[in-house]
Amino acid sequence: MTTEEREEQVLVDRRVAARPKALVAIVGRPNVGKSTIFNRLVGRREAIVHDEPGVTRDRHYAAVHSLGRDYTIVDTGGFDPESDDPMRQGIARQVQVAVAEADVVVCVLDAIQGPLDADRQAVKLLRKSGRPVIFVANKADSARTELESTELYRLGLESLVAVSALHGRGFSELEDAIVSKLPPEEPSAAEQAPEDLVRVAIVGRPNAGKSSLVNRLCGEDRVLVDDRPGTTRDPVDTIAERDGVRMRLVDTAGIRRRSKVVKEHSAVEVVSVLRAMKSMEGADVVVLMSDATVGMTEQDAKILGMAVDRGRAVVVVLNKMDAVDASTHKKLEEDAREKLSFAPWTPIVRCSAKTGRGVNNVVRKIGEVYESFRKRVPTGALNRFFEEVLDTHPPPTQGAKAPRIYFVTQAESSPPLFVVMSNMPEAIHFSYQRYVANQIRKRFGFEGVPVKIAYRERRKIKLAPKKRG
């Protein structure tokens, strides 16, 4: 990847993370090439592809930036509603859920086989959904097979985009069609809410105490609380003010491992998880609730990773501390630090939403990470800081050349993005980039916030030769 491509990817990731994104679902019967189309649109091999029907069972998500628009694309399993196989029936229900949640649906058909009964069932379902649909004839690898794909018009289609996912044929037309049907882009969280109102998404595994924390912060039973997991289905928004921090709290459904969701075929829970993910995208701060009686789990770490990937400020709360022995409190926090070692800058707060102990600390930390999320460092202060860094620890020499850093500036906030100008950005080792990020945190704060740094090349300006005479 070139320097320019790396820079563009950083900015794309930043733009994708900043806004709630439209959802595009890819559906169709088994073995028509949905996963191959998914991979082609994403630009990398994300979904498993195999000639055997039914390889894709769970839905697979990825962020896409195309033609100036950002959206989330979801790959689904093969749609076969008439099958007696319980797994197939579960997949069919999840496909229906994905269609219900989608802003645009891409229905993939087989250009070679022509229309089958499963295709007719899919078209019938999509017409009832009322969603914008793009019908795609895949495997149109040549002009001849593209002509043969016109048989699919017998399904009553108004238009058809012929593509070859294997060779990339027709994908410009497909991307144009998708972007043309996307809804207007929603404003980011910062644009939606007043400056003094912090959007807080409370996430975690089922039964971690998310709803109890919302009720404690509101001072009333705003949301239903039950010991049984899965009580919360839809995200619930409520306004709360505590210790001078005004918050729009979003209580979300518990996020379980996808393997469990698929195994139990819970279509309602699939919707809940999808909406929890969208709530993260629209938040300023994500509060991860972890059950201290269970300890920090791999699933907790995955949920935190989702928030970090979306560029959100984060606070980790070890809840139910009243239910564990006081002598284990420090050990629980140490174990949590170890599980979350990929984000050592994440603050961890102990509390009991049930008794209220430690809740004020949670609110205080939300306010602190929100300020870090919005913080801007003056360019002068940044460059004075970098002079100190370069004096004590300059970039390591690569071969016969020494990378030089000329200046640094903060290009964006919410989350912070820094741009560093260098003569050899590709030669600055990852370990040194991590060192610079750690030093920025040490000097300027940014606790609980993912810091992005883009290294760009400063090109020399070549002057035209002077004319003689």
Image (tube, rainbow, N blue to C red):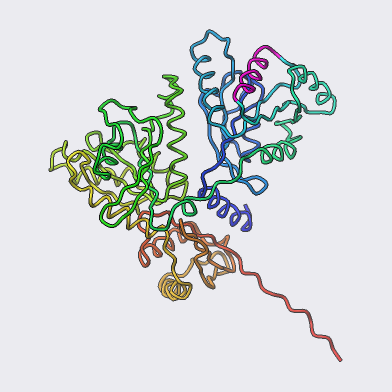
Residue sitting farthest toward the bottom? 469
Which residue is located at x 67 percent, y 17 percent? 119
Q: How many marks are shown on the rendered structure?
A: 0
| Residue at the spot 46% in from the left edge and 70% down from the top edge | 394
Rendering quarter of residue 461: bottom right
In this view, 75 is above or below 30: below
**Depth order, front residue of 49/76:** 76
Q: Is residue 133 left or right of residue 256?
A: right
Confirm whether the magenta stretch covers residue 432.
no
Magenta residues: mostly which secondary structure? helix
Q: Is 18 above or below relative to 272?
A: below
Percent position of residue 407, x then y: 52, 72
Give me the residue at 35% from left, 37% from top: 204
Q: As drawn, which residue projects farthest toward the right?
A: 469
Magenta stretch encompasses residue 123: yes
| Residue 36 horizontal/vertical position (percent) | 64, 30
270, 332: nearer the viewer: 270
Q: Position of residue 68 (x, y in %)?
A: 65, 49
Q: Position of residue 130 (x, y in %)?
A: 61, 27
Along the line of sight, the residue nearer the viewer: 423 or 343:
343
The answer to whether residue 87 is left or right of residue 153 is left
Image quarter of residue 354: top left
- Give the residue furthest to the top: 84
Quadrant of image for the C terminus: bottom right
Magenta-drawn segment: 116-129
